[in-house]
Image: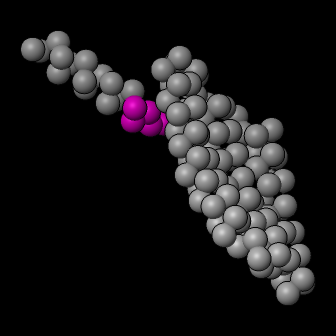
Amino acid sequence: MQLVGSIFILLGAFFLFSAGLGLLRMPDTFTRIQAGTKASTLGNILVLVGIGFYHPDWALKLLVVGYFVLMTNPLSSHALSRAAHARHVPMAPPTMVDALRDEDEARAREQASR
């Protein structure tokens, strides 16, 4: 059981490391948020599973922490990216589609026609 727990913790540490590396290597705010959120969420969950193998009696507490991570990481990244978009933070040049800008323009045209 300890070996399996150690493997999960090691995998989680790898994903957490890749999240940190993604924050350093990605070209703009939006891709940094995405890289950090996805990899850190998976890394945290894997570490929690590994700890669960070490301490099975903590299962309920680890489940609550895992639920909290799964709910707050995507929500916070969404809020950060919406705030960055509202502040007109520039996107990387290779970004081809800005669906939120298109939505905002369509909404503005609709309100202007009223």
Residue 11 in sight here: no
Q: Image height check: is 90 above or below 40?
A: above
Q: Residue at x 55, y 52 (%)?
A: 71
Where residue 25 sits, quadrant-wise, is: top right
Q: Residue at x 85, y 77 (%)?
A: 54
Where does residue 13 sit, x and y in percent of width and height?
A: 84, 61
The colour scheme used to paint the residues is: one colour
Q: Residue at x 74, y 59 (%)?
A: 44
Q: Is residue 10 left or right of residue 86?
A: right
Q: Seen from this angle, which residue lies furthest bottom?
A: 1
Where does residue 97 sit, x and y in percent of width and height?
A: 44, 37
Q: Seen from this angle, which residue lies furthest left?
A: 114
Q: Is residue 44 magenta?
A: no
Q: Image height check: is 61 above or below 109?
A: below
Q: Image height check: is 28 above or below 57?
A: above
Task: Name the foreground residue: 73 vs 57.
Answer: 57
Where does residue 18 sit, x and y in percent of width and height?
A: 79, 53
Q: Which residues are magenta?
A: 95-100
Task: Name the foreground residue: 12 vs 34.
Answer: 12
Task: Name the foreground residue: 61 vs 15.
Answer: 61
Where residue 22 sits, quadrant-wise, is: top right
Q: In which quadrant is the N terminus drawn?
A: bottom right
Q: Is residue 96 magenta?
A: yes
Q: Image height check: is 75 above or below 52?
A: above
Q: In which quadrant is the C terminus drawn?
A: top left
Q: Is residue 2 left or right of residue 74?
A: right
Q: Main secondary structure of the magenta part?
A: loop
Residue 103 in sight here: yes
User: How many marks overall?
Assistant: 0
Q: Residue at x 56, y 24 (%)?
A: 84
Where does residue 34 sit, x and y in percent of width and height?
A: 62, 44
